Image (spheres, grey):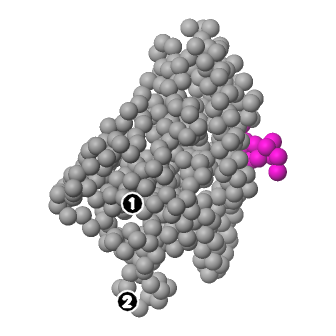
Amino acid sequence: MTTDAWRALFPLTRSQVFLNNAAMAPPSRRVVEAMHAFMSECAEQGSRNYTAWGRRLSGVRGKAATLVGGQPEDLAFVGNTSFGLSLIAQSFPWQPGDAVLVPVPDFPTNVYPWQNLQQRGVEIIEVPRRDGRIDRADVERVMTARTRMLTLSSVDYASGFAADLEEIGAWCREKGLIFVVDAIQSLGVLPLDARRLGIHALAAGAHKWLLGPMGIGLLYVAPQLRELLQPVLAGWKSVVDPENFALHFQLREDAAVFEPGTLNLAGIFGLEAALDLLAEVGIDAIRAEVLSLCDQLAAGLEERSLRVTSPLAREERAGLLLFEPPGQAEALFRTLLAKGVMLSLRNGKLRLSPHFYNNADDVSRFFAALDECLRGG
């Protein structure tokens, strides 16, 4: 397909300049159709195709595993990033006095699940970010002898900084630490290979760069971590041979042990359509297109003497571009929204986040609206 054909899958592009994929991205028509088709099937036939749903579910699990660089048995479907990270936090065999490294500031999703462990006697060691940045030296500086785990956002939501997962993953292996990643701001736009990077657990909701529905997400759990975890939740699907309803409490050994009950199949099949679209375009091509659009936006902002605060070095970049507006940031944000430009306000800065379906026309329309705002004071 051509870029125009892919763009046609996102009807909001006809009425808005949508540069807000790091917040809640629009699902494509394919996602909507897949979810509608499944719900219509349920309405018309009930559970007649239950067995076929199971086979399809296995296929989606395999597609998700390919995206993150794991095997199907490493993947669980969860409701969102917070739920996935909380499962890891609560299922790990902590001992009083153990510690976890948590970079701050960060989005609460990757802070609160770990702070919640303090009631179990776990120490939270904050790793201060430097303008959003975090590297091996930062975490090494504050590590203690009781540190068991490092949790990290692959991309900082408030700066756009993309962490060097390879470097930090290698450091975690060297120190014997469990490496947990919140990947919601990178999965779908940056290539990822969890096994190669030494990531033990990874969670990401589908409603941002994956271009999927809300209320569904992925949890990757490496085999060596699954051996340590003590699942905090259990239900009828947590066990080996779950369709055998005779009581037999034998927990399964794959990541699906973290799926204790009936799954959100409509969301999962919508996610499948999203994953198929990303595979069709190609993650490398998506990254190249997103960075090209960010380059165009950064150049236009520089021409207007507006300072871009996000990193522009290739190895530190993702799809987020933040800049300092003149005057009151919230006033400009509200005015741009009123003009049909969708973006985010984060810590007094404006955040742009284009995806592969955006194009140069969106960039031109954004600057036309921005210039009109700036002329009007």
Position of residue 207 relative to residue 219, above or below, is above
- Residue 46 in view here: no
Q: Residue at x 52, y 32 (%)?
A: 311
> Relative to residue 227, is residue 195 drawn left or right?
right
SS at mark 2? loop
> What main secondary structure does the magenta stretch of the protein show?
helix
> Relative to residue 142, is residue 1 drawn left or right?
right
Q: Quadrant of residue 372?
A: top right
Q: Tag 2 or tag 1, which sits nearer the N-term?
A: 1
Q: Residue at x 24, y 64 (%)?
A: 94
| Numbered circles on residues, count | 2
Q: Which residues are magenta?
A: 1-13
- The image shows residue 356 at horizontal and vertical percentages of 69, 42
Between disc 1 and disc 2, the foreground one is 1
Dot label at residue 247 = 2
Residue matched to label 1:
173
* Three-letter code, disc 2: Leu
Q: Residue at x 50, y 70 (%)?
A: 74
- The image shows residue 55 at horizontal and vertical percentages of 63, 77
Dot 2, how many residues are within 10 Å of its Cα: few (below 14), some (14-19), or many (20+)?
few
Q: Residue at x 60, y 74 (%)?
A: 58
Dot label at residue 281 = none
- The image shows residue 191 at horizontal and vertical percentages of 60, 52
Which image quarter holds the C terminus?
top right
* Three-letter code, disc 1: Arg
Position of residue 10 relative to residue 322, above or below, is below
Position of residue 192 relative to residue 39, above or below, is above
Query: In front here: 177 or 210?
Result: 177
SS at mark 1? helix
> Relative to residue 292, is residue 114 drawn left or right?
left
Dot 1, how many residues are within 10 Å of its Cα: few (below 14), some (14-19), or many (20+)?
some
